[in-house]
Image: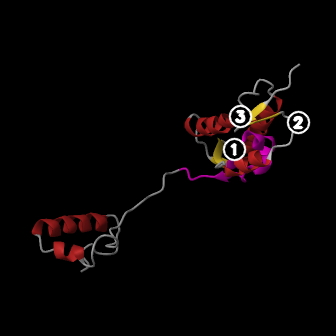
Amino acid sequence: MPTAKRITTGSVSTPDSQPTEDEASTKQDVLPKLLVWSAADKGGIGRIAKSYQDWYDADESLPNAKGSTLVEDLAYTLDQHRSRLAWRSFALVRSSDDLHELQSRMTLPVRVRSEPPRLGFVFSGQGAQWFAMGRELLSYPSFRMELVHAGLFLESLGCRWSVIGK
């Protein structure tokens, strides 16, 4: 039976040989991929991680897939084609070889919020604008009326401060 060979940037090595210095430095230069899992219960994360690790370790049909695209494809699939359930965990993986120790690379599962976060944006007047730029706009009646209407709406929601500052 012929021995599988790995071809990397001008060198050929067998699976039993040690990586060359170039191969080792190339592995370190690869940006890690974020693999995110979710499950309905806390223990489900561990079961899923074990399942993926077992699949990778046992599947003999993956010799070609164990190359550089396996991790990228897995990261994409986990992000785009899986449900986002209440319990989540992640692992940073540089190469498919890291999948051998997937369970030890994963973070502890955390429960995510069930409702979306409430966000608010406030014009701070910093950045490309100049100090008190908004005050100058108050001289225009239409701008002042819009701020008064916005202030009344915010007051109806329980806001304790005034948009105009009075």
Q: How far apart are labels 1 and 3 at the CA level?
A: 32 Å
Question: Which of the pair 158/145 is nearer the observer?
Answer: 145
Extreme-top residue of the structure: 1
Q: Position of residue 20 (x, y in %)?
A: 80, 45
Nearest-to-viewer mark from 2 and 1: 2
- Residues at discs 2 and 1 in contact (Cβ within 8 Å): no
Q: Identify the secondary structure beneath mark 2.
A: loop
Extreme-left residue of the structure: 141
Q: Position of residue 77 (x, y in %)?
A: 60, 35
Q: Which residues are drawn in magenta? A: 90-114
Which residue: 30% across, 65% down? 154
Tell me the residue that label 1 is attached to: 41
Amino acid marked by disc 2: Asp
Amino acid marked by disc 3: Gly
- Residues at discs 1 and 3 in contact (Cβ within 8 Å): no
- Residues at discs 2 and 3 in contact (Cβ within 8 Å): no
Q: Is 158 on the left-hand or right-hand side of 139?
A: right
Residue 112 colored in magenta in the image: yes
Task: Give whichever of discs 2 and 1 has the lower sequence position.
Answer: 2
Dot 2 crowding, Cα within 10 Å, few <14, some 14–19, many 20+: few
Q: Identify the secondary structure beneath mark 1.
A: loop
Q: Identify the secondary structure beneath mark 3.
A: loop
Amino acid marked by disc 1: Asp
Q: How far apart are labels 2 and 1 at the CA level?
A: 40 Å
Dot 3 crowding, Cα within 10 Å, few <14, some 14–19, many 20+: some
Tell me the residue that label 2 is attached to: 16
Question: Which of the pair 5/107 is nearer the observer?
Answer: 5
Tell me the residue that label 3 is attached to: 67
